[in-house]
Amino acid sequence: MTMQAANSDFSGERGVVDPAVLAPAAALFHGLSDPARLAILQHLTMGEHRVRDLTEHLGLAQSTVSAHLACLRDCGLVTSRPEGRASMFTLTTAPELLAVLATAEQLLASTGYAVELCPNYGIGATTTPDAEHLQPHQNLETAR
């Protein structure tokens, strides 16, 4: 799967985008959409960790860390191996994940972190609206 518009798998006749082709990418971004999951992934870039280590380092509840690790494992981003009574978690594809996160940081910087002001997904948004309920955006120049 690629998100490049020039790829023939991405667009059909006359450049019409097939949303089903983009569903895996959307699912990946949903998997990365929680700040706690991003913090866990960032911490795992330093190497393997137990749930207990992550709860201590991130200040999150054990149940929260475990739930997020299960999500990340289901997304194929982390894996675990048993060690005694604990499980050691590690990134499955560290170089690729680090590249995505670095590119995201560059994109945020180049847009001036405008996504923070998005009424649908920005900081303070409490729900994820469906397409029929997306809120209109203000002019970002006047909002800052």
Image (tube, rainbow, N blue to C red):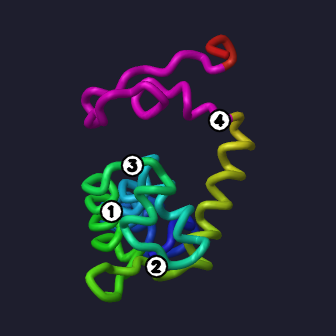
Residue 103 x/y as whole percent: 66, 59
Q: Three-letter amino acid code at disc 2? A: Thr
Answer with mark 1 or mark 2, whichever residue precedes in sequence. 1
The Cα atoms of the two marked residues, 1 and 2, are separated by: 26 Å
Q: Three-letter amino acid code at disc 1? A: Ala
Q: Which residue is mark 4?
A: 113
Residue 60, which numbered label?
3
In this picture, which residue range is highlighted in magenta? Answer: 113-140
Q: Are marks 2 and 3 in contact (CB under 8 Å)?
A: no
Q: Which residue is mark 1?
A: 23
Residue 142 x/y as whole percent: 66, 11
Disc 1 crowd rating (10 Å Cα; few below 14, some 14-19, many 20+) is: few
Q: Which residue is mark 2?
A: 90
The Cα atoms of the two marked residues, 4 and 1, are separated by: 25 Å
Residue 1 x/y as whole percent: 44, 76
Q: Are marks 4 and 1 in contact (CB under 8 Å)?
A: no
Q: Are marks 1 and 2 in contact (CB under 8 Å)?
A: no
Marks counted in the figure total: 4
Left or right of 73 on screen, residue 6: right
**Element assignment for label 3:** loop
**Element assignment for label 1:** helix
User: Which residue occupies 41% across, 77% down?
Assistant: 89
**Element assignment for label 2:** strand
47, 99: nearer the viewer:
47
Answer with mark 4 or mark 1, whichever residue precedes in sequence. 1
Q: Three-letter amino acid code at disc 4? A: Tyr
Q: Are marks 4 and 2 in contact (CB under 8 Å)?
A: no
Q: Quadrant of the C terminus?
A: top right
